[in-house]
Amino acid sequence: MRTQFESPIVLLGSRLLSPYIMLFGIYVIFHGHYSPGGGFQGGALLASSVILIRLSGGRIVSRLQVREFFTTPLAAIGVIVYFGTGIVSILFGSYFLDYEALPFPGGLDPAALRYYGILVIEIGIGIAVMAILVMIYDHMARGEDYV
Amino acid sequence: MVAFAGLLIYGSLDLPYRGDADNLMHSQRSITDTVVAGNYFIQEAYNDANTPNMVTVVLGDYRSIDTLGEQVVVFTAGLICLLILRRYRPI
């Protein structure tokens, strides 16, 4: 753990694998209406793809993917997306987190509005879980000698 | 431990079969003749939210405040990790 060296094989394998894990995470979030999955699981998959690059490439390479600066605001944005959905549905004349009054364009019926409302909060959960897992990893790794 | 495992196996022999329609816990009304609340979620989940996955509807729509609480718990855990692990000055 103490000695560090460049390993192009590991980095190449991670670079090959990481986009597909990220794609699968996005699929799990967006396909949660039809199959097992949802925000928490998809967010964990997205975080695993980001952490894979961070483990193999180090700080300099992983800066190209997701900056360390962005993780804490992204976590807050994920919570705000969820909470703001509830507040918006209050403002348009419904109960808290009752999606049938959300102002989506197109004149949808309440069932379709609930469909899209669930999708929005799943995206919020996914963003928050991904950002929090990456944030914990960053702050743990900064204690080590981490190039 | 073996005796405890034997006790558990003996107890599991009396459990009803999975998916048995005559079973009490799958009936529309409970012992005290009140309507079981989960029936509504199972029967009306597709009509209410247009979503085939019942679990997503319960998690995201009927019990969405609970999911908001879960997300806030995860967020708070992350913030506490940030507070503990953060380096204030270079060592």
Image (tube, rainbow, N blue to C red):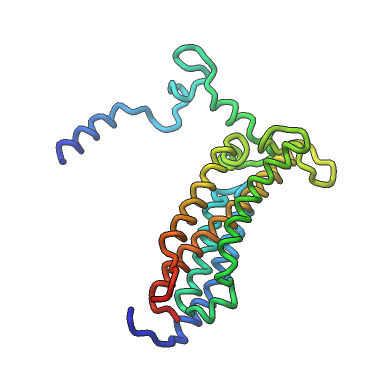
Of the pair B16 and A146, the residue shown nearer to us: A146
Depicted B9 relative to depicted A45: above or below: above
Q: Is residue A25 above or below residue A90?
A: below
Residue B79 location, x and y as percent? 49, 56
Q: Tell me, yes or no, if residue A46 can be seen here.
A: yes
Quarter of the image where the N terminus of chain B is located: top left
A88 to the left or right of A35: right
What quarter of the picture does the C terminus of chain B occupy?
bottom left
Residue B2 placement (x, y as % from top left): 15, 40
Drawn side of residue A105 relative to residue A141, left or right = right
Residue at image point 52% right, 68% down: A49
How many marks on residues?
A: 0
| Name of the residue lying farthest toward the front | B89
Q: Residue at x 42, y 75 (%)?
A: B90
* Front residue (pair A28, A46): A46
Residue A20: x and y in percent read 57, 69
Report the residue at 48% width, 81% height from top: A11
Instruction: Tell me the residue at 20%/32% (across/down).
Output: B7
Q: Is residue A145 above or below residue B17?
A: below
Q: Residue lying farthest right?
A: A106
Q: Position of residue A39 (x, y in %)?
A: 57, 52
Task: Choose between A133 and B9: the one closer to the eye.
Answer: A133
Residue A28 visible in the snapshot: no
